[in-house]
Image (cartoon, rainbow, N blue to C red):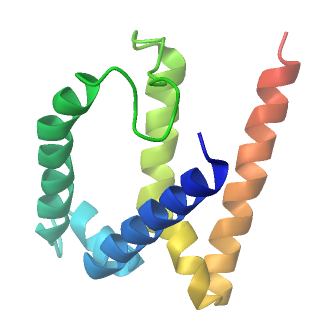
Amino acid sequence: MNSTLRLLAALAAGTLFGFGLSVAQMIDPAKVLNFLDLFGTWDPSLAFVMGGGLAVNALLTPLILKRSKPLLAEYFQLPKKVQIDKRIVFGGIIFGVGWGIAGYCPGPMITSLSFANSDILTVFAAFVVGTFATRWMLAHRG
């Protein structure tokens, strides 16, 4: 498979994803925090964004997986682990708390780097430190 074509496809997909996050205002932490504030200034609009993403995924994934292989790869790379364990549960809790505190999850955070203000740079630095600290901890646990 042509690696240049795969890189261009990845660039196009990432650009489309970032544009979608921007249009949906998911890169605005105030919008996200209002969505999470169920008993205050709740803004349900992001539920429609997530619902739209889930609907597209639910409709297209079965059709895509009927193919013998992906368009730009040799084989499908699906998760081998399907059981829910404590790492998944605790990771989800930590992710949710971080999302609720900062108003960013990784996709919108990376998209927001284009603003280059001190808030997003602080959140990104915390993300990088947390990612490397977790990898180090998992590699060195007994």
Label count reads 0
Q: Residue furthest front?
A: 2
Q: Position of residue 22 (x, y in %)?
A: 35, 79
Judge left or right: residue 137 versus residue 71.
right
Q: Out of 117 and 22, give the one closest to the viewer.
A: 22
Judge left or right: residue 70 versus residue 106.
left
Judge left or right: residue 81 versus residue 122.
left
Q: Is residue 83 above or below residue 137?
A: above
- At 37% across and 69% down in the image, what residue appears? 16
Q: Is residue 67 above or below residue 126?
A: above
Q: Out of 73 and 14, give the one closest to the viewer.
A: 73
Q: Is residue 106 visible?
A: no
Indicate the quadrant containing the C terminus: top left, top right, bottom left or bottom right. top right
Indicate the quadrant containing the N terminus: top left, top right, bottom left or bottom right. top right
Q: Is residue 64 visible?
A: yes
Q: Out of 2 and 57, give the one closest to the viewer.
A: 2
Q: Is residue 98 above or below residue 63?
A: below
Q: Out of 120 and 94, give the one closest to the viewer.
A: 120
Quadrant assignment, res 89 = top left
Q: Position of residue 4 (x, y in %)?
A: 64, 56
Judge left or right: residue 20 versus residue 14.
left
- At 45% across and 57% down in the image, what residue appears? 99
Quadrant assignment, res 23 = bottom left
Q: Position of residue 70 (x, y in %)?
A: 40, 33
Q: Position of residue 25 (x, y in %)?
A: 30, 79
- At 11% across and 66% down in the image, what residue appears? 44
